[in-house]
Image (tube, helix red, strand yellow):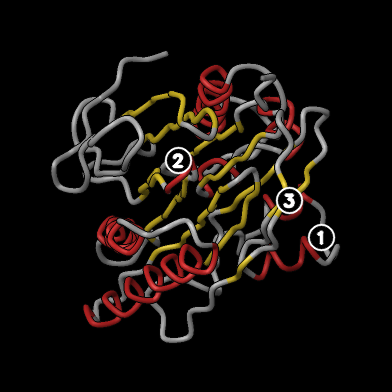
Amino acid sequence: MSDVTPLSAERRGLLTQAQLYGGSFTDGEALFLHSFDTPGGQVALALKRGPGKTGPTEDAAALLPLPNGGIVLLVADGVGGLPTGWKASGMVVASLESQLNGVDDEDNHVRTAILDGIENANSSLLQLATGTATTLVVAEIRAGSMRTFHIGDSAAWVCGQRGVVKLQTTPHSPVGFALEAGLMNEAEALGHDELNVISNVVGSADMRIEIGPRLQLAARDTVLLASDGLFDNLLESEIINIIRTGSLSDNIVQLLQLAERRMAGVEADKPCKPDDFTAILFRPSPPSSG
C-alpha cells in the first residue's frame, strides 16, 4: 500500500480510523490510500486528483460511524466546469456529518438524518447563488443490510463473490437512463458525447433523492461507491473481476492503477476520461462462529 498523503486542512483532516475522510489535495501526488477494519467490516478508500490538474480535487469521501457497528459511506463529486466544485462536495460531507452525529440506531432516525443532511446541503448551495453543485452517493450499512441514496452519476454497486451484481444504481443522466433501458450498450455509453451530462445534482432547485431498497448483504459481498472517475474509465466486467475476491487493500489499488492507465490514454480502444478518482470498498465481517 502506498504511503498516506495528509489531507489538506481546507476540508477535512484524518480524524480517527473510524470517522471521517475527505478533503482537498493540493500538494505532492494528491493521493490518499487507506484500508482498515471497522466493527461491521473492512473498508478500503482511495482518492486521487485527476492527471494534469492543479488545486483541489472536486471529489470528497466520508466514512461516518453509526451505533452498534453501523456505518455510512459516501462519495461526492463536485460538478466540473462550475465554480468551486470542491466546495460543493465538501459542504455535503459536512452537512451529513452534522446530521448523523449522535443519531441513534433507529432505522427511521438514520434515514431522516441522511435526507435532512442532503436537503440542508442543497439549500446551502442554492443560497450561494454561484451555480456550485455536486453529485452524491450514500450507502447506509446497518445490521448486515444496506440502503443507498443518490443524486447524479456517482454510483454504488454490490457484487457477490461469484461476480453477480446484486445492486447497481442508475446514473441520473440521459446516457445512464438510456443504458438502463437497453437503448445503448456499454461501449456506446462510454463513448457518447453526452456521457457526463447530468440531470440531477445537489445544488439544484429540482434536486431529487433516489432511495434504493434495503438489501441484505452476504458475508463475502463487496460494496463499491465511486465517482465517475472510476466508472468512465473501466468496463463493468473489469470492475467486477477486481472487486469480487481478494483483499480490499489490493482491490482498491488495482482499481486506481487501471483507471490511471486509462486516463493516460496508453491503452488503445479502451475508455479514457481524465478526472479525479474516488472509490470506497466495503466488505462485511464474516459471522462469528461462537
- 57 vs 169, left or right, is left
**Image quarter of the C terminus:** top right
- Residue at x 41%, y 67% (from the top left corner): 113
The residue beneath circle 1 is 184
* Above or below: residue 113 compared with residue 192: below
Name the quadrant containing residue 26: top left
- 138 vs 267, left or right, is left
The residue beneath circle 2 is 278
Percent position of residue 88, x then y: 30, 63
Please tell me which of labels 3 and 1 falls first in the chain: 3
**Image quarter of the N terminus:** top left
Please tell me which of labels 1 and 2 falls first in the chain: 1
- Cα–Cα gap, marks 3 and 2: 19 Å
Percent position of residue 204, x then y: 41, 80
- Residue at x 81%, y 60% (from the top left corner): 184
**Marks 3 & 2, CB-CB < 8 Å contact:** no
Name the quadrant containing residue 144: top right
Q: Which sits in the foreground, 248 or 254?
A: 248
- 107 vs 89, left or right, is right
Q: What amino acid does circle 1 point to? A: Met
